Image (spheres, rainbow, N blue to C red):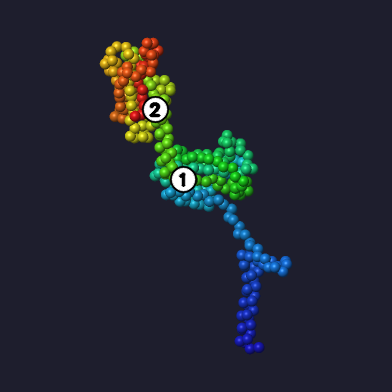
């Protein structure tokens, strides 16, 4: 046989042998099984990575790392230390939330159905969500920008007895936040006006001492005016019918002005407090009795 023929034969053998070895050892996509006369294709599954990524994905922030917060099974305490990559993500979240003070994030904690809840929370998932929130707060984030909830699920990715990142972070839409905020302040305004602050006075006198309930109502008014900048407080003074009407109108105005002065001492801008006097014209009690007269000597404070 000539050298050329031997050379070509060697090439052919190399190709055949290489193809055989590739099919036998290198091709892991599928293999043929011929236990009967019908060829069958069996897919070889790709093994999933044993991690759950830490993901922050919202309007204006996108961060992901393959490390995560971890919890032992049946436990709601974070495993320490937390990895640097997760801490970096938390710091990015802090920067984002400081720049967007209206933004809210809901932390959903998870627990599996076979875990035991020994916490005071209604479920272990909620306990874990609050643990994550508290850790975020310890890292300098604002507690007011987080909500928490917990869910029980069938299974979660684990490494031995450790759950890998059993929490999710949902960024609330600004529109829903605005609606919720509006609803909150509308509800507070209704609360103030439906059960207004009423200051009662002795005959021809005003007073400085308020009850605990009255102080709480003042606090509600202060809170409302701090958040609703266009709000106007209305203080209307009233009197009993003792004496002439003109004098009682003046007395009612004095009572309204006293209330204005008191509210301005509690951080409400005096320019946002309007005063009026109804004198004896709108009694709520019977002026023929001492008790009725006492109830009529008052200032009623509402949001205009």
In the picture provided, is 299 more to the left or to the right than 30?
A: left
Q: Quadrant of the C terminus?
A: top left
Give the image location of residue 74, x and y in percent.
61, 41
Q: Report which residue position mark 1 lands on.
A: 171
Q: Could you say whether the residue bearing mark 1 is in a helix, strand or loop?
A: strand
Q: Report which residue position mark 2 lands on.
A: 193
Residue 134, label in figure: none
Give the image location of residue 278, x and y in percent.
31, 20
Q: Is residue 173 visible?
A: yes
In the picture provided, is 66 more to the left or to the right than 234?
A: right
Q: Could you say whether the residue bearing mark 2 is in a helix, strand or loop?
A: helix
Q: Looking at the image, which residue is at 65% across and 73% down?
A: 20
Q: Is residue 103 above or below residue 212?
A: below
Q: Is residue 265 visible?
A: no
Give the image location of residue 218, x and y in percent.
39, 26
In the picture provided, is 55 more to the left or to the right than 208?
A: right
């Amino acid at each position: 046989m000539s050298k050329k023929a031997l050379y070509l034969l060697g090439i052919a053998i190399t190709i055949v042998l290489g193809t055989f070895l590739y099919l036998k050892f290198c091709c892991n996509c599928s293999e043929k099984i011929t236990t009967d006369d019908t060829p069958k294709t069996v897919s070889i599954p790709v093994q999933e990575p044993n991690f759950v990524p830490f993901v922050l994905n919202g309007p204006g922030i996108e961060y992901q790392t393959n490390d995560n917060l971890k919890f032992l099974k049946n436990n709601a305490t974070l495993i320490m230390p937390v990895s640097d990559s997760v801490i970096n993500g938390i710091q990015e979240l802090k920067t984002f939330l400081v720049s967007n003070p209206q933004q809210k994030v809901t932390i959903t904690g998870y627990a599996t159905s076979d875990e035991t809840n020994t916490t005071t929370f209604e479920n272990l998932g909620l306990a874990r969500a609050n643990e994550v929130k508290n850790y975020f707060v310890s890292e300098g984030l604002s507690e007011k920008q987080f909500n928490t909830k917990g869910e029980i699920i069938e299974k979660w990715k684990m490494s031995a007895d450790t759950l890998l990142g059993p929490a999710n972070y949902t960024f609330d839409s600004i529109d829903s936040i605005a609606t919720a905020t509006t609803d909150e302040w509308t509800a507070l305004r209704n609360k103030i006006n439906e059960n207004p602050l009423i200051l009662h006075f002795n005959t021809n006198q005003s007073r400085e001492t308020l009850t605990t309930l009255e102080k709480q109502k003042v606090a509600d008014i202060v809170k409302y005016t701090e958040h609703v900048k266009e709000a106007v407080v209305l203080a209307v003074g009233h009197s009993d019918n003792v004496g002439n009407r003109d004098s009682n109108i003046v007395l009612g105005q004095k009572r309204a002005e006293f209330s204005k002065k008191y509210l301005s001492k509690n951080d409400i801008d005096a320019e946002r407090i309007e005063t009026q006097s109804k004198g004896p014209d709108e009694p709520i009690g019977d002026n023929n009795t001492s008790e009725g007269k006492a109830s009529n000597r008052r200032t009623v404070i509402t949001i205009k």
